[in-house]
Image (cartoon, rainbow, N blue to C red):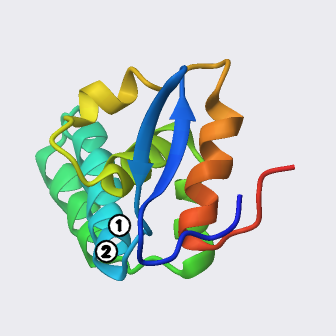
Amino acid sequence: MDKATGKGVEVIIKGKPYTIYPILMDDIWEFGAYVKSQRIKLLNSVEDTKLRQKMIFEVLDKDFTGKELDKEMKKPKGIMFLLWKALRNDMTLKQVNELIDADNLDEVLNIVSGLYGVAEKK
């Protein structure tokens, strides 16, 4: 898919048309915050309070490199989050999650990749 420009691009997902828009820098920033929040959720199961707090502060203090964010964007949760941002509608993240399954994951990755300019998954 060619990169989307400022106008929306219509795509078909699970037989239904959707208009998607380019991923903006604010969306990338929000995605980084989302990844951090998911990592912190995982750390909440650490029983040692001091260790948990130390690990949480490390997650919060870490800045992602472009390569790290790119890797996260190609994971299923990253694909879902970026599609959610690209739809720019009233769908919830949970509803967007229901649009993606094992059968169309690569297709949706290609759609989302075209919105923020990374190479398609091979």
- Please name whichever residue, 66 or 21, is drawn nearer the observer in this view of the structure: 21
In this picture, residue 73 sits left or right of residue 3:
left
Q: Are marks 1 and 2 in contact (CB under 8 Å)?
A: yes
- Residue 7 horizontal/vertical position (percent): 41, 71
Residue occupied by mark 2: 29
- Residue 41 horizontal/vertical position (percent): 23, 41
Residue plotted at (57% across, 44% down): 75
Residue occupied by mark 1: 32
* Above or below 21: residue 12: above
Disc 2 marks which amino acid?
Trp
The image quadrant of residue 113 is bottom right
The image quadrant of residue 64 is bottom left
Residue found at the far right of this picture = 122
* Above or below 62: residue 98: above
- Residue 104 horizontal/vertical position (percent): 64, 26
Residue plotted at (63% across, 73% down): 117
- Residue 86 horizontal/vertical position (percent): 38, 56
- Please name whichever residue, 76 or 92, is drawn nearer the observer in this view of the structure: 92
Residue plotted at (26% across, 27% down): 94
Residue plotted at (15% across, 57% down): 53
- Please name whichever residue, 89 or 9, is drawn nearer the observer in this view of the structure: 9
Q: CA distance from mark 1 to mark 2?
A: 5 Å
Q: Quadrant of the N terminus?
A: bottom right
In this picture, residue 112 sits left or right of residue 24:
right
* Element at label 1: helix
